Image: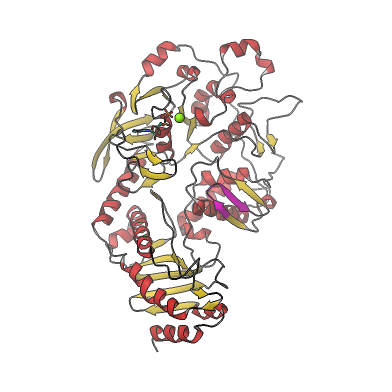
Amino acid sequence: MSDHERLEQLLDRIDGRQYGAYRDLKGRWRLGGITLFVDHVQGDPFAAPTRVRLRTASDLDPGMHRDSDQRLAAEDWLLRRFGEGLFGASRGSGKSGRLYCYRPGPEVVERSGVRLLRDGDVEVRFSMGLPARGRRILGRQAWEMLTHDVPRAARRLEPDPSLEVQVRSVVAQRTLRRQLRDRGLVAFVADGAILPRASGIDPQPMANAVPFESPPSMRVTLETPSGEVSGMGLQGGTTLVVGGGFHGKSTLLQAIQRGHLDHVPGDGRERVVADPDTVKVRAEDGRRVRAVDISPFLGDLPGGRTTRPFDTEDASGSTSQAAAIVEAVEAGARVLLLDEDTSATNLLVRDERMRRLIPRDREPITPLVERVRQMHEQWGVSIVMVVGGVGDYLAVADRVIAMDHFQPREVTAEARALAPTRPSAPGPLPPIEDRVPLREGLRPDKVRAYDERRLRYGQGEVELSAVEQILDSAHAATIGEALRLLHEQLVNGRRTLRQVLDALDAILDDEGVEALSPWSHPTSDLVRPRRHEVAAALSRLRTLEVATSR
Ligand code: ADP
Ligand code: MG
């Protein structure tokens, strides 16, 4: 008997029976040109949906299966296509009778939703709410879903010219990004890029936006397989973005903040690229800080409290941002992005009058402005910073960009003339101390993301709203799974955070993001996290403990 007949018989037999009888669906079904693997069957209509993988021969150019850049671009394209094919395929109310797959935003990033396999097949991971009325099986509807709706979506996996467009675009973006370090650049914003979004909740490009145009003095031309691209090249060191309110400063920074990822063609930011280790840091009062040496920015606090290292359950604006900077560098950040809008002013600067009023020995804070040059020289960290109101940075910046009606102008020379003397640092920067996390504090227990801002991990919740480079709830959930993997990797009291992050990267490079599946089979919603976001989540765990003797 064919699988087709077997499936029909099964669904006929269990039609109208109690929901639990669906369990017999588990296993492999060869249905014409597609094979379905039902990996997990939900226990009732309200439980997490049934997990399925679909495998079929791919009609893509075999070259795309082999080249890792092309493969990533094609997998993303296929996932979007398949998702469009599922749309409107609901056969029931609520969760029952629906098909789900991951619906990506404008970023192209390694995900588990679709994979091109080495043997020339494509595998799609999705889930379905097996249809029910009350708790009774709707066998006929299940049959329609499995033999009609799913194959219809699978037919969308057929390549068309837009696939080629996307693959070329992603390959170009990756080629641009790989050139940055050799050229001494930390970011590149192509002429013609559309940076602003339609709204704060709509990631589509803004209609009728002013296209980006590089200041002539900062224009560089980079090569890609699809031709030369010219635009603004940001050199390492300290870059300031200045200008009046509402002139597009934060919008430029936000585009750079997503520049470690590729974007779909038409997004407007598909030729804005940044160093892969670019990390946004901001103030976040109320967060926990565990054993971070923030002495470069804050000396000992009133009451003899040490900052070397610093511990708190309830950080202030300045201590939270100082900790975020040190933690980012600990995890390997090479470029830090700061926006005055989301920074603690007293960490950024202290003005002349305040210096006179409060002498240095009464003020524990060494403002960042006195440290940025050392951070570049000693830690190898570049900074791109948006400032509207604080002029002190003009003296320490390697270059200054003024945004004026959404157009950048280089004003480095004018800035130098206004601020000729550099504030001096109070002493050398200490090296960053590697923390040694203890296993106990990372016990996973339950892992679940509510959305991109909040993760349930073990006994506690991790607040992630200040970790701005997390894309969505699936990304946050995958970060939770990465913490679970770090837990396995930690050999108590012996491996540093940096070492376990290296191990995580090596495992993900080797096995793909599927290494983070919470089950023995690959699931649909994994989004590859960077070490930076994983480290940021770990640092925010309320249960994190670190070895104290260092
Ligand atoms: P700033 O940080 O300088 O105060 P923002 O970057 O927040 O300014 O931008 C202010 C507004 O202008 C935002 O609503 C933004 O979407 C819009 N905007 C930014 N860049 C452009 C552009 N290139 N064309 C049109 N509107 C833009
Ligand atoms: Mg702003």
Residue 176 at x, y = what percent?
32, 41
Compared with 163, 426 (above or below) is: above
Classified by dominant secondary structure, the portion drawn in magenta counts as: strand
As rendered, which of 191 and 528 lies closer to the eye? 191
Q: Which residues are magenta?
A: 449-457
Q: Residue furthest right?
A: 303
Q: Does the stretch in magenta take in 453? A: yes
The color scheme shown is secondary structure
Q: Quadrant of ligand 2?
A: top left
Q: Identify the residue at horizontal 58%, vertical 56% (top origin).
A: 448
Q: Quadrant of the C terminus?
A: top right
Q: Nearer the viewer, residue 46 or 356?
A: 46
- Left or right of 186? Residue 309 is right
- Residue 9 on image: x %, y %: 44, 87
Q: Position of residue 220 (x, y in %)?
A: 29, 31
Q: Is residue 216 magenta?
A: no
Q: Can residue 119 be seen?
A: no
Judge left or right: residue 342 versus residue 184. Answer: right
The N terminus - image quarter: bottom left
